[in-house]
Image: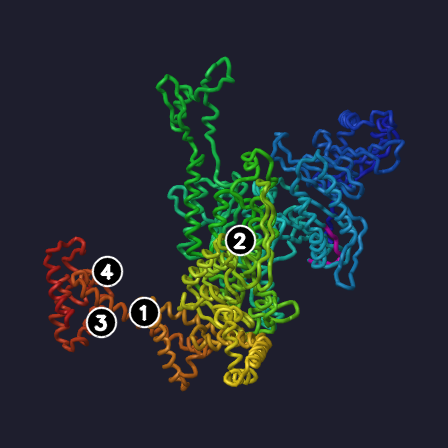
Amino acid sequence: ETGEREAYRLGQLFVFDNWSSMEEDLESVIEDFKETLAHERSAQESDVNVLNIMISYSDSNDLGSTDRSLDGLRDFCKSKPKLVSWVHESGIKLVTFIISSVTHTKYNSCRFYTLRPLNDYKEDLVYRNVDPPMAFQLELPRLMNFDITRVDHPDTSIHMFYGVSKSDNKHAKDRDSRFFVRAVIRHAELFTSQKEMQVTIPQAEDVFAKALEGLEIARCDPAHTRTEHNHIFLNVLPLLDIDVEEVEAVCRRMFTRYASKCWRLRVFNVEIRVLTSRNVKASGAPFTPLRFYLFNLTGHSLHVEGYIEMNDAVQGVTKLVSIQDKKTGSLHGSLIGEAYPVMDRVHRKRIIAQTLETTYVYDFDHLFTKEVEDMWKRYSQSRLLGGFKRHKIPMKVVDRLEFVLNEETNKLETISREPGQNTIGMVAWKYTFCTPEFPKGRKVIIIANDITFLSGSFGPKEDELYAAVSEYSRVHGLPRIYLAANSGARIGIADEIRQTFKVSWVDPNDHSKGISYLYLSDDDYATLKDSVICDSSNGQHRITDIVGAVNGLGVENLMGSGKIAGETSAAYDEVVTLTYVTGRSVGIGAYLVRLGQRVIQKRTSAPIILTGNAALNKVLGRDVYVSNEQLGGVKIMHPNGVTHEVVDDDLEGVRAILTWLSFVPERKNGPMAIMEPLDPIQREVTFVPSSAAYDPRHMLAGNADGLSGLFDKGSWRESLAGWAKTVVCGRARLGGIPVGVVSVETRSVEKFVPADPASPETNEVKSMQAGQVWYPDSAHKTAQTIKDLDRENLPLFIFANWRGFSGGMRDMFDEVLKFGSLIVDALREYSSPVFVYIPPDGELRGGAWVVLDTSINPRFIEMFADPRARGGVLEPEGTIEVKYRERDLLKTMHRLDVHLQKLDEDLKATNVLTDERKRVLETSIRQRELELLPTYRDIATTFADLHDTPGRMLAKGAIKSVVEWSNSRQFFYWRLKRRLAELRVSRELRRADPQLTDADIAEVLRKWARNYSLEEGGSPADTLDSDQWIVQWLEDDEDTVHKRIEEMNRKRLSRDILALGREDMNAFLDGFEELIRGLDPSKRAEFNTSLQQRIARSTQRQSFAQSSGLSGLLSRIGWESPGSGALKGTRPVSERGEGSSSGSGLSRSGSELYEE
């Protein structure tokens, strides 16, 4: 339509029987072709045409040798002036010689040599043995940044190349080496699965699978060094009738199906080109070329970018244009023929981290972002399935700022910078996560080792950053996450001394006799005297101490380790600390893990150790430990209680971190992570505990049979599952409110203690532990969990079904008494509501009751029981053995049994009884007693059991109330909401008046509630005991309650000022003067007027306030008039002497005024 001809590439293929015929006939053949190419050359802006020459050879010909044939071809081209001139005039870009053997006639047996005329006819190795048409389809020029070696593949349609980045230093160890696997798919058809309604391209998936198989074989070749960042390119040539969305779905499914294999083979990039007949963007072309790039740089997050190949008419090039207009890809606007870049610094660090089987520290940002997005997807889906409206997802769910220490001031600063810019082995961020619990965002501090920097070791700078950021989290009350992957404290050596020191030998002629000392020459000492301490008394500079020029060689690293250890311990007490062990954590790194208490550990390649296995083997003198996993892997750290949760990979680890955070408040004493409940509060709890052994998790979360538990469906999250299995601990939600949970295992469990390879006499020990009993480990687990939950500010539910503590010799030796006492310590300090509930057929006996009793912390602990629950010192069977023995049973028999009573009456008639008759009666009585004894033991047991009922517990004030298990969910929800609401108000009251006791606060709340009930026309007797009514009152009357608290705060301040004036009038007036001095001039008149009015009201003598009172006081401190707003002749209090007239004058006037 425009009249312009479209430029295109021309090519010519010449075939010669042998070398001689080519030399004779080539120039004549060129003349026939010259005119056509010359005409087309005028339409081209650059050399794009190609020339292909095919020659046959016999086995005895020199062309059979690659080197000889290549040299001969180059010499031939350069020796033909007409050929050289014609190639230049015709725009020939590539000259390809196809060498075919006479004895091997198959096309795939040919050798291809492609020469570039513009490069002095040197061979382009990228095209070696690739036929010319295929080379363009494979886009081989994009490999130009690499030295390419072709790797054979059994399938000729798949081309594999081993590439090493070009470098001046061919022996450099950090050269980028990778495989490029490329394939052209000549035949492809769409297949639609009727069952899944999915479109697939079977041929593409088949080629992709073969490419991975060939890559797996090639990586086994020792000739190829370790390859990373491998790349696969598939070019689907047939035109397909397919949508863009379907192409993307095909690519995603194909990659996901082979994701684990791709990760194992280090395939991080997959590129797929497809021609579709459906016009995505109107271009006027009969087809639309699409390219999809699939990136999986971290191994956990697949990122897909789709592009359209579009011609730029202005520049005359073809560019990639993102399919999505709003979210452009990383390659948007780039040329389709751009060479693949060599790995940059960040990529190299990423590879180092992945070699150590962890994730590069800056890549965790991608994992956090992906997981927060997935959290929103799951939450939105659950709301939809539950019949609720979908929640609006925030536009940006993750934001972060990086912490750095200012090198000049050593102060902590936040900056935004690209990944990999860190200059030390520790990085830290302040993250903002917009989660379903906090859609507007919550702040979280994350500290992480960079294992790619000096193996993640701790030096002074790393310790300073760690300590400063951790302190920041404590000051602001923010949760603190530590990503551990390190090698412990840094070990250094003074290299400047090592390269210069000299040795004084005992015998210079026989070095085997040893050394006398090390010394420095005069010149070296003059240069290095700041790095070394020498004794120069004998004429030589004998080295006595090496200080080193660099800070961070030895003991200073240990000093820093001590500092961050103390900081971590303080952080655990003040904020929520959580550690994810993503790689090995050694020495101080292991201590930081434990000091942070809450630990998530990766299942493989993330041991928590003090010393490596190799070092221990050297100490032991033999190879005992084969890996660090034996010392600190999950099989050690999970059963011993160091590790709370175990995950399979870093993505699951990030998910566990965010899930844990979803239960804790936004900040210390901040808003709780409450969500709208999707599980109805009013529903009954259908799983019913029984006297038989059962899984306590079913009581908490329901079971697979559809029976529901107490807490919200899907909210239960267990921790410390591998340790002390007779106790079950975790977190859950009740009506959307996060709570901590401690329950008891009613089944017997097995405890396993491994054998130590270093001690051949040890054996692994397996022992059984009965349910409903606290052992040393389970008591320790209970106490530790309570401490953790308290620091998370979570309400606590304890499902009490313990018969007591195990008091055997071994358990007493293993400190069951100490760990049981720790439960009391933890509960005494607990600062959130605690609900102790005895479930149906549950029992709480002896010492187990003692450590959970409400009197330990009456402000926060409440105890409840199901009607079928029991509680007492001993079980009924044990009680009757002590308090209802056989003689008591016999007395009861004779009191209740009519037959025995008759026999007793007959026996009393001793005056008329013969001895024989007496013996008969006694025998009958004994037989009757033996006959009734089992029955009366049951009666005695029932009688003793009636002393342990909830009714008696309630009558004695041991429990708050009796709660039916089926209705416990609704009851505890409103009870929990009431306790939290009252706790919030009581804390405000305590801040307003610290002198208020718990009883005072309770009385104030009762008084306010009673008044509100009367105002609303209700009955206080009915409403004050209703948890739901109290909650609704505190919500409806919130403004009034806050005003009353503010009034109490003012009264308290007034009382404190009054007490201050009575204690020291001069100090009071000094402070008063400083207050006036600091007021803005505009506020002084208002203050003066208000003060006069208050004094006048209190004295009821207006003239006094206006004349002799306030005016006199203000004039004495230099305030001329209420409206002037100026002070004259005054000095700060600190500048006045004790004997100043102003001070004494103020005292007299102030005393009079105060008394008035």
Q: Which mark is residue 1078?
A: 4
What whole-number distance in Å separates the C-alpha atoms at marks 3 and 2? 64 Å
- Kindly report the distance in space between the C-alpha atoms of the residues bearing marks 4 and 1: 32 Å
Q: Position of residue 647 (x, y in %)?
A: 59, 53
First-in-chain label (4 vs 1): 1
Amino acid of disc 1: Leu
Mark 3 and mark 4: Cα distance apart in space: 17 Å
Q: Is residue 279 magenta?
A: yes
Front of the two marks 2 and 4: 2
Residue nearest the observer in this picture, 440 or 513:
513
- Residue located 13% across and 64% down the image: 1115
Magenta segment boundaries in residue numbering: 273-280
Cα–Cα span, label 2 and label 1? 41 Å
From the viewer's perspective, is 258 left or right of 523?
right
Nearer the observer, disc 3 or disc 2? 2
Q: Is the residue 1046 above or below the residue 212 in the image? A: below
Mark in front: 2 vs 1: 2
Q: Amino acid under label 3?
A: Ser
Task: Determine the residue positioned at 19% across, 76% down.
Answer: 1097
Residue 1145 percent coordinates (x, y)? 10, 62
The reply to whether dot 4 and dot 1 touch (C-beta < 8 Å) is no
Residue 641 has which mark? 2
